[in-house]
């Protein structure tokens, strides 16, 4: 990530996200969460962006090593991935994927 912190990048994405129709922001498990279409789609987790993605995309990211599975306590979050701070552009692309997945149903 550039000279900005991971949190600053998250805040940039959050501000962009909140301009979308049916977007929201709330606390989930004590973490700052972004919502789309009434569903949780992303949250800031230990300097990573955790996202709820389609199962096929989540599996690809995990298999490639680009992401890990976030844990809530000792429980792995199914269909969620945690992406390290590799660049705001990549986070933006994945957030778009998460929003699209939330609005497909």
Image (cartoon, rainbow, N blue to C red):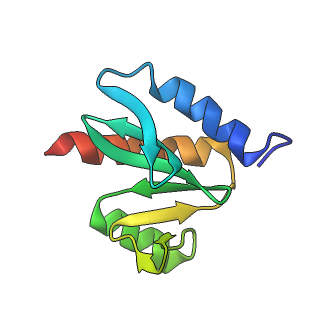
Seen from this angle, which residue lies furthest right? 3
Q: Position of residue 97 (x, y in %)?
A: 38, 47
Q: Nearer the viewer, residue 55 or 6?
A: 6
Residue at figure coordinates x 43%, y 37% from the top left:
26
Image side of residue 67 versus residue 39, left or right: right
Image side of residue 44 versus residue 27, left or right: right
Q: Quadrant of the C terminus?
A: top left
Q: How many marks?
A: 0
Would you identify the image quadrant in which residue 77 lies? bottom left
Residue at figure coordinates x 55%, y 25% from the top left:
15
Q: Is residue 21 above or below residue 95?
A: above
Q: Position of residue 8 (x, y in %)?
A: 72, 37
Q: Is residue 75 above or below residue 49?
A: below
Seen from this angle, which residue lies furthest front? 30
Q: Is residue 25 above or below residue 65?
A: above
Residue at figure coordinates x 34%, y 46% from the top left:
40
Residue at figure coordinates x 63%, y 30% from the top left:
12
Would you identify the image quadrant in which residue 95 lies? top left
Q: Nearer the viewer, residue 93 or 35?
A: 35
Q: Is residue 32 above or below residue 58?
A: above
Q: Position of residue 89 (x, y in %)?
A: 61, 41
Q: Position of residue 38 (x, y in %)?
A: 25, 36
């Amino acid at each position: 990530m550039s000279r900005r912190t991971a949190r600053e990048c998250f805040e940039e994405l959050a501000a962009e996200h909140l301009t979308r129709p049916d977007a929201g922001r709330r606390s989930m498990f004590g973490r700052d969460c972004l919502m789309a279409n009434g569903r949780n789609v992303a949250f800031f987790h230990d300097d990573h962006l955790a996202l709820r993605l389609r199962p096929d995309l989540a599996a690809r990211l995990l298999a490639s090593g680009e992401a890990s599975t976030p844990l809530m306590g000792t429980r792995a979050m199914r269909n969620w991935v945690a992406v390290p701070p590799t660049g705001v552009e990549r986070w933006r692309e994945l957030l778009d994927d998460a929003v699209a997945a939330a609005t497909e149903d």
